[in-house]
Image: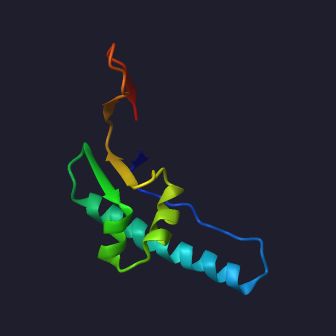
Amino acid sequence: MARFPLRLRVHTTRSRKPREQASARDLNRTAAIVETYINDKFATAAEHDVQQFTYAIVARELNLDPDTVCRALLSAGGRSNGITVVKGDLYVHAGCLEGRVYRRL
């Protein structure tokens, strides 16, 4: 899970190869677009809100490559299919069935 406001990592490369440098620039450009999109969605959300974003839907709405969107959001805590973003101070169930185990996000 990631917290609002979402901040995506800047991807760098040490390579001098133009192809790898162009790939890093494209990934950073995609990350900036996706970061703005998700933060704008949360700007009008309630104080304590949780939203899920799947890579395919974000990519389709922004006309971007789904694999590049996935690579950009994995750095912020995304999982195999999407990312969950939390706004505010929230307690969630940690998945323990026997007792009541809660953890603070």
Q: How is the image coloured?
A: rainbow
**Residue 5 sits in quarter:** bottom left
In which quadrant will I find the C terminus?
top left
| Visible residue check, residue 31 | no
Name the residue rendered at 27%, 63% in the picture: 41
Q: Nearer the viewer, residue 6 or 21?
A: 21
Rendered position, 20 above or below 41: below
Q: Which of the two residues, 60 or 40, is positioned nearer the viewer here?
A: 60
Quarter of the image that includes the N terminus: top left
Q: Position of residue 2 (x, y in %)?
A: 42, 48
Where residue 52 sits: x, y (%)? Answer: 30, 53
* x and y, in percent, of residue 62 in the image: 34, 77
The residue that appears at 33% across and 37% down in the rendered structure is 89
State the image coordinates of residue 78 (x, y, percent, origin top left).
45, 53
Q: Residue shown at 32%/75% (left/top)?
A: 60
Q: In percent of the image, x 45 and y 53: which residue is there? A: 80
Q: Residue furthest bottom?
A: 18
Placement of 44 over or under 94, stated as above or below: below
Residue at the top extreme of this rendering: 99
In the drawing, does residue 66 fall left or right of residue 27? left
Q: Is residue 52 left or right of residue 30?
A: left
Q: Is residue 65 visible?
A: yes
